[in-house]
Amino acid sequence: MTVRRNRHASAANTGNPRADHDGPVDLPPSSRRRRLVTAGLFRALAVTIALVTLYYVAPLDVLSGAPVAVTLTGGLVVLLAATAWQVRAVLISPHPAIRAIEGVAAMAPLFLLLFAGTYYVLAQSHPESFSITGLDRTDTLYFTVTVFATVGFGDITATSQLTKIVVTLQMIFDLIVLGLGVRVFLGAVRLGRQRNAASEQPDSTTVDGSG
């Protein structure tokens, strides 16, 4: 009994948190932040995998008869709606910066896959649209990424006027996504932090009344 009491006393003197309570020890803010960032990136990776899977299994061939403008406009509407939802999530999140990282990581693949789907529909409805006929979904996704990265290997090129217009639109939207899109998310982070700071401040009337 005396030895056990001495152990408890030494544990309390050394500041061991387990001597005070048996519950989980609170992590420091840096560790919590790393865990939140890791969890957000894993969620973004899961969204990316789901989007790529949907891209390969979706019945895009049924859109071959539809005008390309309708297909592209519908995809851009989906992109804008998803971006607006992500920005709103950043504004109301208790950790807006981490939520913004997750949002950007999820929106970039959606943007690329929407154009890849448009190119695939073009390749099916107008085989002469590209320098190589019979492009599959992997080919059009590869072409989309090369345009986004401004690599330009030249193995697949746009040959028809319609395809060149779509590629030009993608290059313009690339600049918008890299510039304006990131600025929108950064602005949402700033507003989210201001909102969280305002909610954490005590009400001045309550403080005055308590005195």
Image (spheres, grey):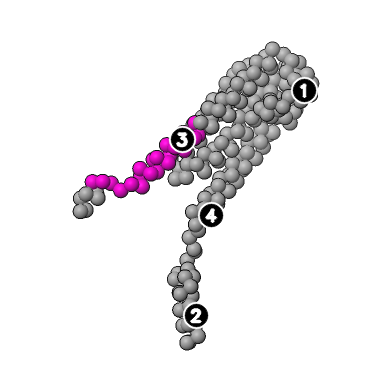
Residue 190 position in % (x across, y down)? 44, 37
Q: Earlier in the sequence, mark 1 or mark 3?
A: 1
Tell me whether circle 1 and circle 4 mark residues in contact (CB < 8 Å): no
Q: Residue at x 50, y 34 (%)?
A: 185
- Image: magenta residue range: 184-205
Name the N-terminal-most of marks 1 and 2: 2
Q: CA distance from mark 2 to mark 4?
A: 30 Å
Q: Position of residue 22 (x, y in %)?
A: 47, 69
Q: Is residue 190 left or right of residue 201?
A: right
Residue behind mark 2: 7
Say if mark 1 contacts mark 2, CB within 8 Å. Answer: no
Closer to viewer: mark 1 or mark 2: 2
Earlier sequence position, callout 2 versus callout 3: 2
Mark 4 or mark 1, which is nearer the start of the sequence?
Answer: 4
The residue singled out by tag 3 in the image is: 188
Q: Amino acid at mark 1?
A: Gly
Q: Amino acid at mark 2?
A: Arg
Question: Is there CB contact under 8 Å for labels 4 and 3?
Answer: no
Give the labeled residue for mark 4: 31
Disc 1 and disc 2: Cα gap in Å? 74 Å
